[in-house]
Amino acid sequence: IGISGQWDLCTDRITFTHNAGSMIPYHRNLTTKGYRALIY
């Protein structure tokens, strides 16, 4: 495995929310429907 060039941090060009709040309600909803949810 090799590296092709230098890494460039581009977070200033992508619009996203750093803090999305608690995901517990979403995980609860998924798991009660039988889906698996990963919490990290």
Image (cartoon, grey):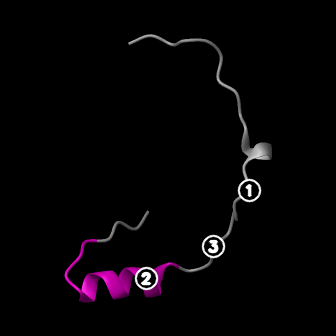
Q: Type of residue at label 2?
A: Tyr
| Residue plotted at (62% across, 78% down) | 21
Circles 3 and 2, Cβ within 8 Å, touching? The answer is no
| Residue plotted at (71% across, 34% down) | 9
Q: Is residue 18 left or right of residue 30?
A: right
Q: Distance between the Cα atoms at labels 1 and 2? A: 22 Å
Q: Of the residues under marks 3 and 1, which one precedes in the sequence?
A: 1
Of residues 16 and 36, the one nearer the viewer is 16
Q: Is residue 18 left or right of residue 32?
A: right
Q: Determine whether 1 is above or below 29 in the image.
A: above
> Where is residue 35 shown, x and y percent of the image?
23, 76
> Can residue 34 be found in the magenta stretch?
yes
> Can residue 12 be found in the magenta stretch?
no
Crowd around label 1: few <14 · some 14–19 · many ≥20 (10 Å): few
| Residue plotted at (36% across, 86% down) | 28
Q: Type of residue at label 1?
A: Thr
User: In this view, which residue lies farthest toward the left?
Assistant: 34
Q: Which mark, residue 15? A: 1
Crowd around label 3: few <14 · some 14–19 · many ≥20 (10 Å): few
Disc number lying in front (1 or 2): 1
Q: Which mark, residue 5? A: none
- Tell me the residue that label 2 is attached to: 26
Q: Is mark 2 on a helix, strand or loop?
A: helix
The quarter of the rendered structure image containing the N terminus is top left
Q: Is residue 30 left or right of residue 4?
A: left
- Tell me the residue that label 3 is attached to: 20
Q: Is residue 5 left or right of residue 14?
A: left
Crowd around label 2: few <14 · some 14–19 · many ≥20 (10 Å): few
Range of magenta residues: 23-36
Q: Determine whether 40 is above or below 22 in the image.
A: above
